Image (cartoon, rainbow, N blue to C red):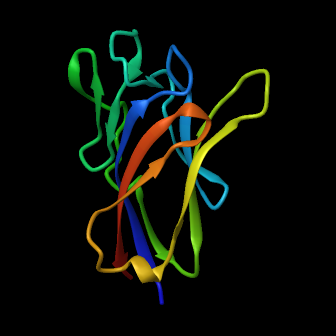
Amino acid sequence: MAYTLRLLKLECMQSQEIGGDEAYLTLDGHKVWEAGRDKMSHDLSHAHCCGEVDFESGRLLTQDGWVNMESFDPNAYVFPGLSGTKVVQLWDDDLLTRDDLLGETPISEADIGHGHISVLFTRDGARYRLTYQVDQG
Protein backbone atom coordinates (compact mmCIF):
# COMPACT_ATOMS: atom_id res chain seq x y z
CA MET A 1 0.00 0.00 0.00
CA ALA A 2 1.34 3.43 -0.95
CA TYR A 3 1.62 6.14 1.68
CA THR A 4 2.66 9.78 2.01
CA LEU A 5 5.11 11.07 4.61
CA ARG A 6 4.62 14.68 5.76
CA LEU A 7 7.38 16.24 7.85
CA LEU A 8 5.75 18.67 10.29
CA LYS A 9 8.28 19.91 12.82
CA LEU A 10 11.84 19.43 14.11
CA GLU A 11 12.66 20.75 17.59
CA CYS A 12 16.09 20.98 19.21
CA MET A 13 15.91 20.50 22.98
CA GLN A 14 19.68 19.93 23.34
CA SER A 15 22.25 20.37 20.59
CA GLN A 16 25.20 18.02 20.43
CA GLU A 17 27.70 20.82 19.86
CA ILE A 18 27.97 23.93 22.06
CA GLY A 19 27.54 26.38 19.17
CA GLY A 20 24.76 24.37 17.52
CA ASP A 21 24.50 21.46 15.12
CA GLU A 22 24.76 21.50 11.33
CA ALA A 23 21.66 19.30 11.24
CA TYR A 24 20.16 17.54 8.26
CA LEU A 25 17.49 14.91 7.66
CA THR A 26 17.65 11.97 5.28
CA LEU A 27 14.91 9.69 3.95
CA ASP A 28 16.37 6.32 2.98
CA GLY A 29 19.82 7.87 2.66
CA HIS A 30 18.76 10.87 0.54
CA LYS A 31 19.10 14.32 2.09
CA VAL A 32 15.62 15.92 2.29
CA TRP A 33 16.38 18.93 4.51
CA GLU A 34 19.40 20.73 5.92
CA ALA A 35 19.77 23.59 8.36
CA GLY A 36 21.98 25.43 5.88
CA ARG A 37 23.59 28.55 7.33
CA ASP A 38 21.37 28.27 10.43
CA LYS A 39 22.56 25.76 13.00
CA MET A 40 20.10 23.94 15.25
CA SER A 41 20.48 24.77 18.95
CA HIS A 42 18.48 24.85 22.16
CA ASP A 43 20.29 28.11 22.99
CA LEU A 44 18.92 30.80 20.70
CA SER A 45 21.39 33.42 21.96
CA HIS A 46 23.88 32.18 19.36
CA ALA A 47 23.75 34.01 16.02
CA HIS A 48 22.42 32.01 13.07
CA CYS A 49 20.78 29.37 15.26
CA CYS A 50 17.25 28.08 15.22
CA GLY A 51 15.56 25.96 17.84
CA GLU A 52 12.65 24.72 15.79
CA VAL A 53 11.73 24.17 12.15
CA ASP A 54 8.08 24.28 11.08
CA PHE A 55 8.00 22.36 7.81
CA GLU A 56 4.29 23.08 7.24
CA SER A 57 4.50 26.87 7.27
CA GLY A 58 8.16 27.25 6.31
CA ARG A 59 9.27 29.05 9.45
CA LEU A 60 12.27 28.87 11.80
CA LEU A 61 12.26 29.80 15.50
CA THR A 62 15.28 32.08 16.03
CA GLN A 63 16.45 34.67 18.56
CA ASP A 64 14.32 37.13 16.55
CA GLY A 65 11.21 34.95 16.90
CA TRP A 66 9.63 33.09 13.98
CA VAL A 67 11.18 33.94 10.61
CA ASN A 68 10.39 32.61 7.14
CA MET A 69 12.64 30.02 5.50
CA GLU A 70 14.33 31.20 2.33
CA SER A 71 12.72 29.86 -0.88
CA PHE A 72 10.07 27.83 0.95
CA ASP A 73 8.20 25.25 -1.14
CA PRO A 74 5.20 23.81 0.78
CA ASN A 75 5.56 20.49 -1.06
CA ALA A 76 9.27 20.08 -0.37
CA TYR A 77 8.65 18.15 2.85
CA VAL A 78 5.81 15.95 1.57
CA PHE A 79 6.86 12.57 0.13
CA PRO A 80 4.04 10.75 -1.68
CA GLY A 81 4.01 7.28 -3.21
CA LEU A 82 6.22 5.57 -0.63
CA SER A 83 5.93 1.84 0.02
CA GLY A 84 7.49 -0.64 2.40
CA THR A 85 9.56 0.57 5.34
CA LYS A 86 11.60 3.75 4.94
CA VAL A 87 14.03 5.25 7.45
CA VAL A 88 14.26 8.91 8.47
CA GLN A 89 17.59 9.85 10.04
CA LEU A 90 18.84 13.02 11.73
CA TRP A 91 22.52 13.81 11.23
CA ASP A 92 25.02 16.42 12.35
CA ASP A 93 27.36 17.42 9.51
CA ASP A 94 30.98 17.38 10.61
CA LEU A 95 33.62 19.00 8.41
CA LEU A 96 36.72 17.05 9.45
CA THR A 97 35.25 13.78 10.73
CA ARG A 98 32.43 11.40 9.85
CA ASP A 99 28.94 12.92 10.26
CA ASP A 100 27.20 12.01 13.53
CA LEU A 101 23.95 10.05 13.44
CA LEU A 102 21.74 11.67 16.09
CA GLY A 103 18.78 9.33 15.62
CA GLU A 104 16.56 7.42 13.25
CA THR A 105 13.04 6.10 12.95
CA PRO A 106 11.31 3.65 10.60
CA ILE A 107 8.27 4.86 8.64
CA SER A 108 5.73 2.50 7.07
CA GLU A 109 2.09 2.06 6.09
CA ALA A 110 1.47 0.86 9.67
CA ASP A 111 1.72 4.55 10.68
CA ILE A 112 -1.27 5.57 8.49
CA GLY A 113 -4.08 7.13 10.50
CA HIS A 114 -2.09 7.72 13.68
CA GLY A 115 -2.18 11.52 13.32
CA HIS A 116 0.86 13.51 14.37
CA ILE A 117 3.65 11.14 15.41
CA SER A 118 6.58 12.44 17.48
CA VAL A 119 9.85 10.61 17.98
CA LEU A 120 12.86 11.57 20.08
CA PHE A 121 16.40 11.42 18.73
CA THR A 122 18.83 11.22 21.68
CA ARG A 123 22.19 9.96 20.44
CA ASP A 124 25.59 11.51 21.17
CA GLY A 125 24.26 13.91 23.81
CA ALA A 126 21.73 15.54 21.46
CA ARG A 127 17.98 15.66 22.08
CA TYR A 128 15.65 16.40 19.16
CA ARG A 129 11.96 15.76 18.53
CA LEU A 130 10.71 15.10 15.00
CA THR A 131 6.98 15.28 14.34
CA TYR A 132 5.50 13.82 11.16
CA GLN A 133 2.31 12.36 9.74
CA VAL A 134 1.70 9.39 7.46
CA ASP A 135 -1.34 9.40 5.18
CA GLN A 136 -2.67 6.86 2.71
CA GLY A 137 -1.67 7.39 -0.89
* Residue 49 horizontal side relative to residue 107, left or right: left
Residue at point 51%, 14% (across, down): 19
Residue 89 visible in the displayed image: no
* Residue 69 horizontal side relative to residue 64, left or right: right
Q: Is residue 77 above or below residue 85?
A: above
Across and down, in percent, residue 89 comes to 58, 52
* Residue 25 horizontal side relative to residue 110, left or right: right
Give the farthest residue toward the right: 97
Residue at point 48%, 31% (across, down): 35
Of residues 75 and 105, the one drawn nearer to the viewer in this rendering: 105
Q: Is residue 70 above or below residue 25?
A: above
The quadrant of the rendering that contains the C terminus is bottom left
Q: Which quadrant of the view contains residue 84? A: bottom right
Residue 78 visible in the displayed image: yes
Give the farthest residue toward the bottom: 1
Across and down, in percent, residue 80 comes to 44, 72
Across and down, in percent, residue 17 comes to 56, 21
Residue at point 37%, 18% (across, down): 43
* Residue 21 horizontal side relative to residue 80, left or right: right
